[in-house]
């Protein structure tokens, strides 16, 4: 019987490669083939809390966007709003007016 020159092509070589692959998956891979951790829910609570915070922040940002869109619409259509905004924000006045600032 002729001896096989290539170990990895033989039956035992193939079995060795499969066994090595399974050992790698079981112990060393990030996506564990078998999960040995005692607490299976250790990361779930942190993710749920983070998800809740992000949903709250998302809702706040949606409200801000809606408010800003409304303000943009007022700037485009309402000249009295533009005048009011300029007077309050930039302390602007007409040529014959005096501006009095009061501390509240």
Image (cartoon, rainbow, N blue to C red):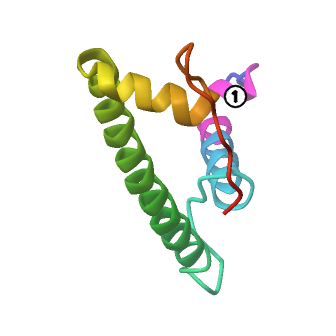
- Quadrant location, the N terminus: top right
As drawn, is 73 to the left or to the right of 51?
Answer: left
User: Residue farthest to the bottom?
Assistant: 38
Q: Position of residue 54 (x, y in %)?
A: 49, 58
The quarter of the displayed image where residue 4 is located: top right
Dot 1 corresponds to which residue? 8
34 or 58, nearer to the observer: 58
Q: Residue at x 55, y 80 (%)?
A: 40
Q: Position of residue 83 (x, y in %)?
A: 42, 24
Task: Say above or below: 70 vs 43.
Answer: above
Q: Residue at x 65, y 60 (%)?
A: 26
Task: Say above or below: 91 vs 21.
Answer: above
Task: Say above or below: 99 vs 102.
Answer: above
The boundaries of the magenta stretch are 5-14
What's the magenta bit mostly, secondary-structure-wise? Answer: helix
40 or 7, nearer to the observer: 40
Please tell me whether mark 1 sits on a helix, a strand or a loop.
helix
58 or 32, nearer to the observer: 58
- Quadrant location, the C terminus: bottom right
Residue 6: say if magenta. Answer: yes
Residue 101: say if magenta. Answer: no
User: Residue farthest to the front?
Assistant: 96
Task: Say above or below: 90 vs 41.
Answer: above
Q: Position of residue 31 (x, y in %)?
A: 59, 53
Q: How many marks?
A: 1
Q: Residues within 10 Å of mark 1 (few under 14, many from 20)?
A: few
Q: Residue at x 66, y 40 (%)?
A: 17
1 or 79, nearer to the observer: 79
Q: Residue at x 34, y 21 (%)?
A: 75
């Amino acid at each position: 019987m002729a001896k096989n020159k290539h170990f990895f092509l033989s039956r035992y070589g193939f079995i060795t490669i499969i066994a090595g692959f399974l050992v790698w998956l079981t112990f060393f891979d990030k996506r564990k083939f078998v999960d040995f951790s005692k607490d299976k829910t250790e990361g779930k609570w942190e993710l749920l809390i983070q998800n809740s915070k992000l949903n709250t922040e998302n809702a706040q940002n949606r409200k801000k966007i809606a408010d800003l869109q409304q303000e943009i619409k007022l700037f485009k259509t309402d000249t009295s709003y533009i005048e009011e905004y300029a007077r309050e924000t930039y302390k602007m006045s007409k040529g014959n007016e005096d501006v009095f600032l009061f501390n509240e």
